[in-house]
C-alpha cells in the first residue's frame, strides 16, 4: 500500500466499507458510500487535513504511523470479511451435501450429528432454506421427510430464531422459486402451514411477514394461501399432517399420550427394559424432554414411585437413549413449571431441588446447565386464582380497547381492580405490551397512548417492564423481533413521560443477566433515546405522534405559546382549536402542568378558566388532569425555589379540582412527588 501521498486512498475506503458489510454474508454487492460516512476515533491532536505545517511552515506528509494504523485496521477487517465469506460459502456446499444425504438415508440422528460437526449455528437458517427448497422440487416422500426433519432438529440442533429466519428467506425467494417450480405458492404455503401445526413457527409469522413484503410479491400470495387455504380450514391440523402421506406420523398429542401410557405401565410392571424399548419405538429423540418432564411430575406426585422413575431416567441417560441435552431440557421445563405445580404439591420446589441434586450427584444431569431454583417462591400479594382471573379479563379489556375508547378501559379497570392493587396494574401493563407486540403499527400506537393515559404509578409500570424483560427470552421463541419491539415500547414510555430516564437504571438493576434478551432490550432502548432527534423519531415510530415534523420539544413549545396567548387576552375557542390541531390528546397533561405552574407563578387564574372549559368539553380527560397535577406534584421542590408558597397553592388547587370533579375525590399527593389516586401510590 502506498503511503507517500499522505492520505487514505479511495481504494482503502472501499475496502473498509466492504468489510463493514460482513455482518450478513448474503448481503448484496457493496453500494457506493461516501468515505465521509466512515468515522474513525478523533483526537484533538490529529491533523484535520492531509498536510500539516512543520517548523518552517512547509507542508509535510500526514503522520505515516497514523496512516499505517488505519491501513492495518482496514486490512484486518477486510481479512475477517473474506474469511467469513469463505466460511459461509464452505457451509453452503456442506449443507447441500447433508440435505442430499438425508433424502437418501432418511436418518434424522445422522443428519443432526453432521449439523453439529459443521459447527456454524449462525448459518443454520441457510440449512432450513436449502432443505425446504430442495424438497419443494421433489416428491411427497421428500417433502414429508423435510417436515419431519425440521421438527426433529428444532430447538436442540437449530435455534428457533434460525428456523424463523430460514422461512423468512424462503418467503423472500418465492418469486425466484416460481421460475423453476410452477406450484411454488401452494407447496411453500403447505410447508409454512405444516411448520405452524408442528409448533416450530409461531402463527404471528404470517402477519409480521405480510408487513415486510411488497404487495405484489409471490411471498404475499404464499402467506394468504397459508392463512385462508390451509390454517383456516376445519380440522386443518390433521389435513396438513396427512397431506404428504405422513399418516404414520404421530401428532404431538399422540406422542404425549404414548409417553404417559409407557410411564404408567412401567410404574405398574417395573420392567425397565420394556420401558426403554417403548421409548426407542417412539422414534422421537427430539421430544425426549417430555419423557423427563412427565416422569419428574409423576415422581413428585407419587412419592412411593420416585426412586423407580429416577432409575428409569438414569438408565436411559447412561445408555444414551435420552441424550444429555434432552435431560437438561426436561429439568429446565420443570423449573419453569414448578410454580404452577406448587398449587397441588405445596413442597414442589423442595422436592424438585432434591431430585436435581440426586441426578447431578449420580452423574446423569449437568446441574450447571440449569437455571437457578430458589427454594422460596416469589412473594405474591395476590392469590394465584385472583391473578389468573384478572389476566383473562385484562386481555378482554385490551381487545375491546381497539375501538379506541380509553374512558371505557378506565371504567373496566376500576370495576375489576376495585382495590387498586399494584400487582394487578403490573399484570395489565405486561399483558397490554405482550399483546401489542403481535399487533400492527396502528395497534402498537394505540397501546402506547393507552399506557400514557392510564396514570398508573410509575413503580407499577417499572415492574411491568421488569416482568416483560425477564420473560423476553421465552417471548423470543414466538417473536424473533422482541428486542426491537420491546425496546421501542420502553423508549416510547420515557418519551411519553410515563417513565423517567432514571427508571431505566432501576429496571436494569433488577437482576438481568448480562447476555439475556432483556439486557439487550434495555441497551437498545437507551441507544434509541440517545440518538439525535430521538424524541421525534420514537414518538412517530408507529405512525402516530401528531403532526409530521414536530418533535416533543416542538409540541411543548406550541403548548407554551398557546397558553401565553390565551393568558394575554386570547379567545378560549381559539385556544381549544389549537389544542385539537396538535393531534396529541394523550399529551394534554402537559397543558395542565404548564397552566398550573403559570397560575401559581403569576397568581393569575385566567388559565384556570381554560382548564375548566377543556374539561367540560371533554378535550382534557380526568386521566390527563390527574397526570398533569401529578407532574406538578413531582416538581414542587424545584418550583418552591421561585414560588415559596408553591406547596400551599398546589394543595388549594387540588381541592378546587376535586370540588369541580376534575380529580377523583380520593386523589392525594405526597411532598416527595408521588401523586396518588384512590389512595394508591
Image (tube, rainbow, N blue to C red):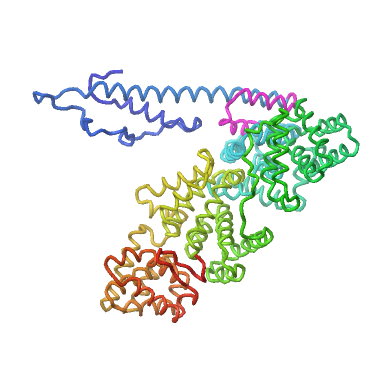
The answer to whether residue 343 shows anywhere in this view is yes
Q: Along the horizontal axis of the image, is 375 left or right of 551?
A: right
Residue 424, placed above or below residue 342: below
Residue name at image x 43 percent, y 74 percent: 619
On the image, which quarter does residue 65 sit in? Answer: top left
Q: How many marks?
A: 0
Residue 436, placed above or below residue 41: below
Residue name at image x 44 percent, y 81 percent: 660
The answer to whether residue 218 shows anywhere in this view is no
The stretch of residues the image draws in magenta is: 104-131
Q: Is residue 538 or residue 469 the one in the foreground?
A: 469
- Which quadrant does the N terminus fall into? top left
Residue 453 picture location, percent across and down:
48, 65
Q: Is residue 286 or residue 294 the one in the foreground?
A: 294
Residue 66 picture location, percent across and down:
27, 24
Q: Main secondary structure of the magenta part?
A: helix
Amino acid at each position: 500500500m502506498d503511503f507517500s501521498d499522505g492520505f487514505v486512498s479511495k481504494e482503502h475506503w472501499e475496502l473498509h466499507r466492504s468489510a463493514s458489510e460482513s455482518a450478513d454474508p448474503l448481503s448484496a454487492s457493496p453500494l457506493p458510500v461516501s468515505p465521509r460516512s466512515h468515522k474513525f476515533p478523533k483526537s484533538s491532536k490529529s491533523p484535520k487535513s492531509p498536510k500539516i505545517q512543520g517548523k518552517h511552515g512547509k507542508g509535510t506528509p500526514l503522520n505515516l504511523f497514523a496512516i499505517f494504523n488505519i491501513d492495518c485496521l482496514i486490512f484486518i477487517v477486510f481479512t475477517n470479511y473474506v474469511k467469513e465469506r469463505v466460511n459461509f460459502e464452505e457451509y453452503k456446499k456442506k449443507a447441500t451435501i447433508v440435505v442430499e444425504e438425508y433424502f437418501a438415508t432418511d436418518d434424522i440422528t445422522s443428519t443432526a450429528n453432521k449439523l453439529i460437526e459443521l459447527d456454524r449455528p449462525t448459518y443454520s437458517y441457510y440449512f432450513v432454506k436449502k432443505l425446504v427448497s430442495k424438497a419443494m422440487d421433489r416428491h411427497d416422500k421428500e417433502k414429508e421427510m423435510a417436515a419431519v426433519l425440521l421438527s426433529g432438529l428444532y430447538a436442540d440442533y437449530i435455534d428457533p430464531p434460525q428456523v424463523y429466519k430460514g422461512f423468512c428467506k424462503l418467503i423472500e425467494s418465492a418469486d425466484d422459486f416460481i421460475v423453476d417450480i410452477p406450484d411454488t405458492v401452494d407447496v411453500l404455503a403447505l410447508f409454512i402451514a405444516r411448520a405452524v401445526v408442528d409448533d416450530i413457527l409461531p402463527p404471528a409469522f404470517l402477519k409480521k411477514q405480510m408487513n415486510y413484503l411488497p404487495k405484489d410479491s409471490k411471498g404475499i400470495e404464499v402467506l394468504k394461501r397459508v392463512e385462508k387455504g390451509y390454517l383456516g380450514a376445519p380440522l386443518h391440523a390433521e389435513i396438513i399432517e396427512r397431506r404428504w402421506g405422513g399418516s404414520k406420523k404421530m401428532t404431538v398429542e399422540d406422542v404425549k399420550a404414548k409417553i404417559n401410557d409407557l410411564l404408567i405401565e412401567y410404574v405398574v410392571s417395573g420392567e425397565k427394559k420394556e420401558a426403554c424399548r417403548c421409548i426407542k419405538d417412539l422414534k422421537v429423540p427430539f421430544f425426549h424432554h417430555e419423557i423427563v418432564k412427565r416422569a419428574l411430575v409423576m415422581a413428585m406426585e407419587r412419592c412411593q414411585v420416585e426412586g423407580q422413575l429416577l432409575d428409569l431416567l438414569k438408565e436411559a441417560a447412561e445408555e444414551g437413549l435420552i441424550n444429555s441435552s434432552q435431560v437438561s431440557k426436561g429439568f429446565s421445563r420443570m423449573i419453569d413449571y414448578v410454580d404452577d405445580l406448587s398449587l397441588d404439591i405445596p413442597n414442589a420446589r423442595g422436592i424438585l431441588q432434591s431430585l436435581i441434586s440426586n441426578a447431578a450427584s449420580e452423574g446423569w444431569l449437568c446441574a450447571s446447565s440449569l437455571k437457578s431454583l430458589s427454594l422460596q417462591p416469589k412473594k405474591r400479594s395476590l392469590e394465584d386464582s385472583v391473578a389468573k382471573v384478572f389476566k383473562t379479563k385484562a386481555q378482554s379489556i385490551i381487545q375491546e380497547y381497539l375501538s379506541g375508547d380509553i374512558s371505557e378501559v378506565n371504567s373496566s379497570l376500576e370495576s375489576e381492580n376495585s382495590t387498586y392493587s399494584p400487582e394487578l396494574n403490573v399484570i395489565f401493563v405486561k399483558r397490554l405490551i405482550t399483546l401489542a407486540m403481535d399487533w400492527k403499527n396502528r395497534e402498537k400506537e394505540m397501546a402506547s397512548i393507552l399506557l400514557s393515559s392510564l396514570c398508573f404509578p410509575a413503580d407499577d409500570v417499572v415492574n411491568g417492564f421488569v416482568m416483560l424483560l425477564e420473560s423476553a427470552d421465552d417471548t423470543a421463541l414466538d417473536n424473533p423481533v422482541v428486542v426491537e419491539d420491546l425496546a421501542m415500547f420502553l423508549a416510547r414510555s420515557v418519551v411519553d413521560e410515563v417513565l423517567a430516564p432514571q427508571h431505566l437504571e432501576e429496571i436494569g438493576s433488577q437482576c438481568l443477566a448480562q447476555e439475556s434478551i432483556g439486557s439487550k432490550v434495555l441497551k437498545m432502548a437507551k441507544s434509541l433515546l440517545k440518538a439525535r432527534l430521538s424524541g421525534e423519531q420514537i414518538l412517530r415510530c408507529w405512525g402516530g405522534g401528531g403532526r409530521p415534523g414536530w418533535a416533543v420539544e416542538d409540541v411543548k413549545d406550541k403548548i407554551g405559546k398557546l397558553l401565553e396567548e390565551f393568558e394575554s387576552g386570547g379567545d378560549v375557542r381559539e385556544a381549544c382549536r389549537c389544542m385539537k390541531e396538535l393531534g396529541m390528546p394523550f399529551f394534554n397533561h402537559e397543558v395542565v402542568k404548564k397552566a398550573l405552574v403559570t397560575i401559581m407563578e403569576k397568581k393569575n387564574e385566567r388559565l384556570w378558566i381554560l382548564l375548566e372549559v377543556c374539561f367540560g368539553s371533554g378535550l382534557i380527560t380526568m386521566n390527563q388532569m390527574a397526570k398533569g397535577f401529578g407532574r406538578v406534584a413531582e416538581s414542587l421542590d424545584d418550583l418552591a425555589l421561585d414560588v415559596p408558597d408553591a406547596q400551599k397553592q398546589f394543595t388549594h388547587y387540588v381541592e378546587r379540582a376535586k370540588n369541580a370533579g376534575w380529580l377523583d375525590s380520593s386523589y392525594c399527593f405526597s411532598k416527595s412527588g408521588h401523586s396518588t389516586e384512590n389512595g394508591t401510590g
